[in-house]
Amino acid sequence: MNISMRYTLGLTLLGGSALLSGCHIDMWEQPKMKAYYESDFYTDRQASRALPEGTIARGKLRTDDAFTTGKQAGKFVAQIPAEAVKSFGGPKAMLDRGENRYTVYCAPCHGTAGNGNGFIAQRGLGFWQKLPATLHQPRLLKAEDGYMYDVLTHGKGAMYGYASRIQDYNDRWAVVSYVRALQLASGGNVPAAVTPVAVAATPAPSEPAEPTPAPRVTATPAPVEALPATDAAKKEQEDLDSAMSKLTGDVLFDTAKATLKPESQIFLTAVAEILKKNPDSKVEVGGHTDSQGKAASNLSLSSQRADSVRDFLTSKGVAGSTLLAKGYGSAKPVADNSSSEGRAKNRRITLTVQGGAN
Ligand code: HEC
């Protein structure tokens, strides 16, 4: 009796569930879209959906080149890849973005000027904790852009990496560009030890010892040669020399042209900051070439190049009346024109603070 009742109940339950499963659709037989079939479901009537932005095909993930790692063949790249500058549509936009990201992610520790005195350094760290580095130390001034990128990405010592927070490679390079601008603009904070090295790389035009008494193309009046008179002018000259030491003509311009390369505009933006700090001084922008080619075309190329640098600096807010652009052609070599190294040094732009200023 008892047993037969249980049996009946069991059968009823089974029957019920069999009925229920009749109106249920399993996942493997539900209606579905086939790729490339037309469909009413989406308004564009395509069953295939576009890939989400940023999707990378298998095997196409870039993990080994200069742009994504800051290294090429195991060595840090010297300069920010042009690809990154292009992605922002120009150096100004890149620096702006860099400033923005730097302010969010780096300034709390390294300070808005990169001196290592951000508010976390001032208030949030115990005496036993490592202080953030000043970004203006000699070793870091000389470090490659790729090294900066690497520190930002993977961290260094007590500093953790920012790869997960600054995910976009372009943004990382933008921060690097801004750190570079801070370093160049810091001027006064460049330790004295660095300056002679920087000057040696590109001797200043006011250097007294010229290798040969080169023939003058134009009768240059004395003031150009005169050493800066005051301490302020001297310091401005040192800052400019240090900022310009990386900027040979080859870095600034395409071969035989006077148009500025996008990468170099970042550095000139920093130079503009130095000039704006010294609004009362007059500065000569000198263009120089090597001795190859015709003297006349060298002279005109050098003045066109000096003009482009002047125009760029004024576009960054430096008063045009304080800048004097002048082309010297090959008349003022600072190195031997018979070697290609020497010629590269001679192709340059010089910024000379005029004597008696300020
Ligand atoms: C939470 C604090 C903190 C933040 C935020 C921070 N750093 Fe650092 N950073 C440090 C400390 C601490 C050091 C020193 C690390 C050491 O030497 O052990 C350092 C060192 C460095 C160095 C020098 C590395 C070297 O070779 O000595 C660079 C360059 C640097 N940071 C860049 C950045 C950049 C760029 C950002 C923003 C993306 C950033 N840091 C954000 C704390 C910070």
Image (tube, rainbow, N blue to C red):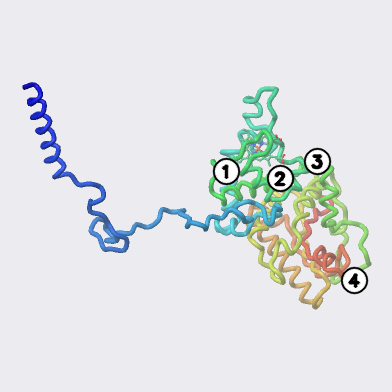
Q: CA distance from mark 3 to mark 1?
A: 30 Å
Identify the residue position indicated by label 4 in the image.
215
In terms of secondary structure, where does tag 4 sit? loop
The Cα atoms of the two marked residues, 1 and 4, are separated by 55 Å
Report the mark closest to the observer, 1 or 4.
1
Crowd tier of the residue under label 2, counting other residues whose Cα lies within 10 Å: few below 14, some 14–19, many 20 or above: many
Which amino acid does the dot numbered 4 rest on?
A: Pro
Q: Is residue 45 left or right of residue 345?
A: left
Look at the image and tell me whether residue 319 can be seen. Answer: no
Question: Which residue occupies 26% across, 63% down?
Answer: 38
The numbered dot on residue 163 is 1
Residue under pointer 2? 183
The 10 Å Cα crowd at callout 4, few under 14, some 14 to 19, many 20 or more, is few
Say what amino acid the circle numbered 2 marks: Gln
Q: Earlier in the sequence, mark 3 or mark 1?
A: 1
Q: Position of residue 330 (x, y in %)?
A: 83, 70
| First of labels 1, 2 by sequence position | 1
Where does residue 333 sit, x and y in percent of width and height? 86, 65
Kindly indicate the quadrant of the structure image that contains residue 244: bottom right
Disc number placed over residue 191 in the picture, else none: 3
Query: Which is more N-terminal, label 2 or label 4?
Result: 2
* Identity, as a three-letter code, of the amino acid under mark 1: Ala
Task: Give the foreground label among 3 and 1.
Answer: 1
Work out how far the residue at label 4 is from the one at label 2, CA to CA, in angstroms.
38 Å
Q: Are marks 1 and 2 in contact (CB under 8 Å)?
A: no
